[in-house]
Amino acid sequence: MLELHYLNALFVKLSFDSFVLLIDAIYIPRNSNVNIYNDHTDTVHSLLCNYNNAKIIILGDFNLPAIK
C-alpha cells in the first residue's frame, strides 16, 4: 500500500499468482494547483513502469472544473 498524503491518494496492489491489480483512490480539492494533477499522473506512470503487466483502476474525485 502506498499513501501520498499531499495528494489525498491511496494506492493498493493486489496480486493473484501472476495477475497484478493496482487500485488508485484519489481526492483532489477544487482549485488545486495543476502540479497536484501532474504529481498524480507521474505517480501512476511510475507504478505502471514498476508493474508493467498490471491492470489499474483509478477512482476518485478530480474536481476538474472544465468537465461537467
Image (spheres, rainbow, N blue to C red):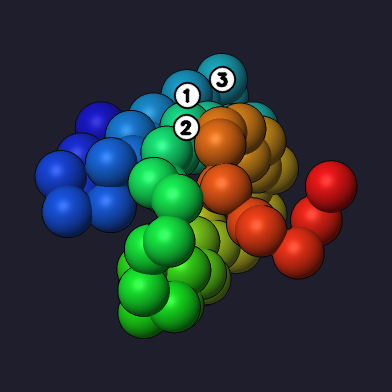
Q: Secondary structure at mark 3?
A: strand
Q: Answer left or right for 8 relative to 55.
A: left
**Do labels 3 and 2 touch, CB within 8 Å?**
no
- Residue with the most extreme left position: 5
Residue situated in front as seen by the camera: 23 or 60: 60
Residue 43 vs 11, above or below: the answer is: below
Circle nearer the viewer, 1 or 3? 1
Mark 1 — residue?
14
Rate crowding at label 2 as few (under 14), some (14 to 19) or many (20 or more) other CA atoms within 10 Å: some
Identify residue for label 3: 16
Residue 52 visible? yes
Determine the CA span between mark 3 and mark 2.
20 Å
- Please indicate, yes or no, whether residue 22 appears anywhere in the rendered image: no
Residue type for callout 2: Ala
In the displayed structure, does residue 30 sit left or right of residue 61? left
Q: Is residue 5 above or below residue 59?
A: below
Q: Nearer the viewer, mark 2 or mark 1?
A: 2
Give me the C-alpha separation between circle 2 and circle 1: 14 Å
| Residue 58 image-quadrant placement | top right
Q: Are marks 1 and 3 in contact (CB under 8 Å)?
A: yes
Q: Which residue is mark 2?
A: 25
Residue 36 in the image: state x and y as whole percent: 36, 68
The numbered mark, 2 or 1, whose residue comes first in the sequence reads: 1
In the image, taking residue 53 as reference, residue 12 lies left or right, namely left
Image quadrant in which you'd find residue 52: bottom right
Looking at the rendered structure, the number of numbered marks drawn on it comes to 3
Instruction: Specify the amino acid type for callout 3.
Output: Phe
Disc 1 crowd, CA 10 A, few/some/many (<14, 14-19, 20+): few
- Which residue appears at 38% of the width and 63% of the height? 32
